[in-house]
Amino acid sequence: MANTPISPPWKALLYICMALFSMVISCRGNPSDHKVYVVYMGDLPKGGISASAHHVSLLQATLGSKRASESLLHSYKRSFSGFVAKLSEDEKNKIASLEEVVSVFPSTKKQLLTTRSWDFMGFPVNSERSQTESDVIVGMLDTGIWPESPSFNDTGFGPTPAKWKGTCQSSSNFTCNNKIIGAKYYHSDGSISPPDFPSPRDSEGHGTHTSSTAAGGLVSGANMYGLAAGTARGGVPSARIAVYKICWLDGCSDADILAAFDDAIADGVDIISISVGGFFAVDYFGDPIAIGAFHAMKHGVLTSNSAGNSGPEPESIVNFSPWSLSVAASTIDRKFLTKVLLGNNATYEGVTVNTFTLPEESYNLVYGGNVPNTSAGVDGSISRYCEAGTLDQTLVKDAIVLCDELNDADGPAAAGATGAIMNGDIFNDTAFAFPLPASYLSLLDGAQVYDYINKTSNPTATIFKSTEFNQTAPFVVSFSSRGPNPITRDILKPDLTAPGVDILAAWSGATTVTGIPGDDRVVAYNIISGTSMSCPHASAAAAYVKSFNPTWSPAAIKSALMTTAAVMTVNENSDGEFAYGSGHIDPLKAKSPGLVYDLGEADYVKLLCGQGYSSKNLQLVTGDNSTCTAANNGTAYDLNYPSFTLSGPVTAVFHRTVTNVGSATSTYKALVAAPSELSVSVQPSSLTFKSVGEKQSFVVTVSAAIASEMVSGSLVWDDGTYQVRSPIVAYSTDAF
C-alpha cells in the first residue's frame, strides 16, 4: 500500500508490481520460504467436535507435532471451518490433497477499493424510518474507525441490541459506545509498525469514511475547508456499527478478511459491508470474500461489496459472487473544478479538490520536461511526468509545474514546488485531492499551457481554490469496474450502482487529507472517491430495507434493491448494464418492492453443481449431504436471480419464481421492452396473488441474434402500484 488513505484507480499498476515483487521474494529457496496459506474446510464440523482441535489434529497428522505448533497462525471456528498456517509448497500440497479440505490458497494482500449523496438519491433526512432501525447492526470490514468523530456520537442511543454477541477490543487509545458497539482488529502475520495502531483505531481514514457513510449520525456544518458544506449523515443514522479492522498500510490480507467474516457472522451483524477487492478474478472458493459472503448468506446476512476500481476495462469486476451484492460507483449532481490562470489571462478549469488558497497573484510556471534532475541521470522524457525524484529542486522550488500525467503529485511536493498542473485523458470525471495546490486539465488544455510556456520568456500562473458546480447525474464513473461476469457469465454483474464520486464523510485524525508526506491538513471530514464509497451507500440501503423487513433473506433484500433501482441507459454509459447493472439504487422504493426473487443456500448449491463443483466439496461447504446429480445440476438460467443474462447468440429459457410482499390481492402484468435483436416471451403473461407471501412462477424465453457486443431490454411486472423491473442482457463472449 502507498501512504495514501485510499488507493486511487491510477495506482493499480503500482499495486500489481508490489504484489508481483512480493511473490518473487516469497519464492526464494531458503529457510524462510514458508508462505502464509488459508486452508478452507467449509462448514463447521458436526457432533460437537471442536473446529480448532480438528485443525491442530489435521496439522499434527500431516506435518508432525512440532511443525504443527510452529505453522498454525489462526483457526476459523465460529461461523465456518478453516485455518491459517505458514507452510512450504510441499506441505501445502499435502494438505490440499486431504478429503476434508475444500481449498488452499496463499493469503495475498487485497486493496481498499456525505452531505449530498443521500439527498441526491431521493432519500432525504426526514424519510420514513423504522422503529427498529436502532436494532440493525452494520458490520464494517475496513481500516478501523476514528471513534471520536462526531459522526459516531452515541447521544440518544439506548443499550446494545440483545442479539449482539461481539466484543470490543478496548485499549489505552480505543473504547466503544452505544453507537460503535463492537470493534476488533486482525493482523495474523508480521508486526504492527507506526503509523498503524495495534487497535481498531483507524490510522488511514478509509474505514472511518465508509462507516460514517453507511451509518454515521447527523452532523451539521460538516465540510472540508468550506467545500461540500452541509449536514453529514449516514443512510441509517440510528443503526449500530460493528468494526472489524482488516486493512493496514500494506493492504488487507486474505487470512484476516476470513477471520473477520468468521467473527462478524457469529457476533450477530445484520449486514456486512466490505470495500475491499483483489487485482483479478478468482474462483469462488479461492476468494476469501466470496467464501465469507457464502457463509454470511447461510446465516441470513447479506454482504455488500465494491465492484472494483479497475474500469473502464471490460470484465474488470473483482467481486461478483452470486450470493453477494456487487456495487458499481456513479456520480452525484455535484462536481469540483479548480481554475488555472496563466500570465496571458487565459483560464482553464480542471477536476481536483483543491483546498489551498495561494497568497501571491502569480508564480513562475515551468514544464516538468524542461527541469529534469540531471544529477540523478534523469532527462526530460522522464521528468515530464513529475514522478518523485525526477525534478530539479533548484528549478522547481516555489514554481508551478506542468506535468504530463495524473499522479499523486508527491514529486512536485517533494521538490518544493508551489503547485502542479497535470493533464491527461483518464479519470477526468473524478476529483482527487493532492498535497499541494493542483489542477488536472484535459490533454487539449494541457497542450495550450505547454504552448504558452514555450512561447513566453517568463511564464507565470496561479491555481485557485476549488469551487462547486452542478452536473447532470448519475453516470457510472470511468474507474468503476465493469462486467461481464468473468466466472459465471450468465449472471449479470455488477448488480447495481450507487454514489461513489466526491463523497464527503468522516475522516481519521491520525492522518491528513492525502496521507502524503508534507501534507499537514488534518480534517474531520474528507472528500474521496471509489467503489469503496458506493459500497457503504448500498450497505446502508440494505440495512434500511432490513429494518422494515427483519425476516427477509439476503436474497430478498438484494432483489428489492435491484428491482426498484432507477433506470439508467446507454445514453449515460455506453457500457450499459455492464457498468450499472440493474440501475441506480433507490432506498425508499426498495423497502416496499411489491415482489421479490428469493433464493436460499440450496439454490446456490444447484448452481455450483452446474458450474462443475464436486459433491465432496459442496458437502464440506454446506455441512450437509448435498450431492450433484442430474436433477440438481442447474444452470445460471435456473437461478432465481433478479436479472436475465445470456452469453452468445442462443435461445435461453429462464425459470423464475416471485414472492408477493406487496398488496395481499393483486394482479401483475408482464411488460417487455426489447430491441429487435432480442425476442422475449413470458409465460404466463400475468400473475395473480391472493395473499402476502404467496409465490408464483413463470418462464421467460429469450432468443438473441447479437450483431454488437451487447444488447439489452427489460421485463417489468406491473400491478398499477408496484413496478418490479429486471434487465435482460445478451452479449457475445467473443467481444470480451
Image (tube, grey):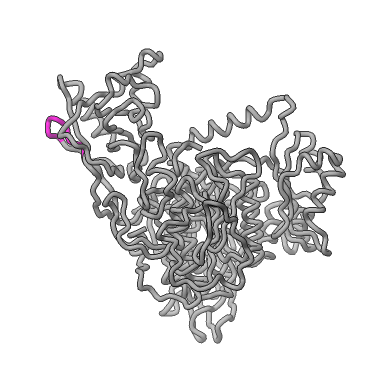
Q: Is residue 76 visible?
A: yes
User: In terms of image quadrants, where is residue 152?
Assistant: bottom left
Picture coordinates of residue 91 (x, y %)?
79, 37
Picture coordinates of residue 504 (x, y %)?
36, 54
User: In terms of image quadrants, where is residue 712?
Assistant: bottom left
Residue at coordinates 31% horizontally, 54% vertically from top-left?
223
Residue at coordinates 81% horizontally, 53% vertically from top-left?
53
Question: Which residues are drawn in magenta?
Answer: 339-346
Magenta segment includes 284 = no
Residue at coordinates 78% horizontally, 53% vertically from top-left?
52
Q: Is residue 649 visible?
A: no
Q: For this view, does 97 lie left or right of residue 433? A: right
Q: For this view, does 36 lie left or right of residue 349? A: right
Picture coordinates of residue 616 (x, y %)?
79, 54
Indicate whether 137 appears above or below 437.
Answer: below
Residue furthest front in the image: 172
Picture coordinates of residue 477 (x, y %)?
38, 48
Indicate whether 587 appears above or below 341.
Answer: below
Q: Identify which residue, 150 or 608, lies in the foreground.
A: 150
Magenta segment includes 341 = yes
